[in-house]
Image (cartoon, helix red, strand yellow):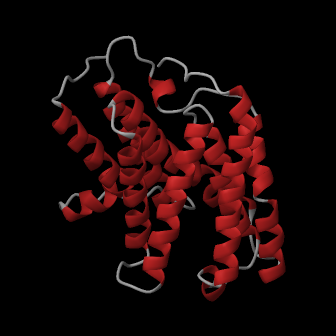
Amino acid sequence: MPTLRLPTWLAACVVVLTLAVSINLRDLAAWLGTPIPKLPIPYGGAILDNGLGVLLVLAVAALLLRPGQRLHALLGLRWNGWQGPGLALLATLPCWLGLWWLGGVNPTQDVLALLMLGVLFPFAEEIIFRGFGFIFAHRQQRWPWLAAALVQAVIFGAIHWWSFGGGGGMALQVFAITGIGGLVFAWLNTLDDYTLWSGLALHVSLNLAWNVFVISEATAVGWPATVLRLSAAGLAVGLVWAWHRPRRRPAAVA
């Protein structure tokens, strides 16, 4: 596949623009007067939004690759063992127990909703924002670690803020929580040798918990639920760091 050799500043603009429009391609198309209809199935619009976003970042990443580089490694998709993801899952256990105590099990939840909201959509977001927006930007584009982590986290938070209608109040809290989440997932990626799986495990488990239990809007933005999420994130980082610290080795060559 042909690749593009762009000036550093232009490649950086391409990465940022790709992140910004990734899961908003249908909104952009509608704004341009060429709406893309959703798939005629449950969650058809969200499936198409996330699928188009993943395809876009895969295409852009492939075009920006240099000869000899491996796309899957530079998107964090190689496997680095089960220990990191397992510890990230373990870290969410107190959050699950706390949310169960706060709201109880949702009796109306169905398997399809859990699969989509808890697994498929978080996986797509991790490929787009942490795989492309963080790992690819940092390791392939040579962005400084903090710049790569912050840019994807801000865009990740802004997209969720926009989906909640923008403005203030709850939307701003959503921006803050998802932005912090983006930073934590990137940190876990780094600790787990620049792979997605520990961050994905945390993301999936928290999303599943949010859909398994009955969580009102007031509860979702309240201090107990916020502390539970932040505690899970902090515990995940601590456990994965403690596990990998004595085993630290150079990251695999992409």
Please tell me which residue lies in front, 249 or 222: 249
Q: Is residue 154 left or right of residue 205?
A: left
Residue 105, image quadrant: bottom right
Q: Position of residue 108 (x, y in %)?
A: 76, 75
Relative placement, left or right, of 68 versus 6 is right
Q: How many marks?
A: 0
Residue 151, horizontal then vertical, whole percent: 35, 52
148 with respect to 108 (left or right): left
Work out whether 153 lies above or below 75: below
Work out whether residue 53 or residue 147 is closer to the camera in this orientation and state it: 147
| Residue at position x 62%, y 60% in the image | 117
Q: Residue at x 28, y 47 (%)?
A: 16
Give the residue displayed 76% in from the left and 59% down from the top: 92
Residue lying farthest top?
Answer: 68
Q: Quadrant of the N terminus?
A: top left
Residue 192 in the image, given as x and y percentages of width and height: 63, 35
Q: Is residue 30 visible?
A: yes
Residue 227 as seen in the image, left or right of residue 43: right
Residue 39 to residue 186: above or below: below
- Tell me if residue 114 can be seen: no
Query: Who is closer to the viewer here, 242 or 169?
Result: 242
Corner quadrant of residue 71: top left
**Which residue is at the far front?**
246
Of residues 24 and 178, the one drawn nearer to the viewer in this rendering: 178
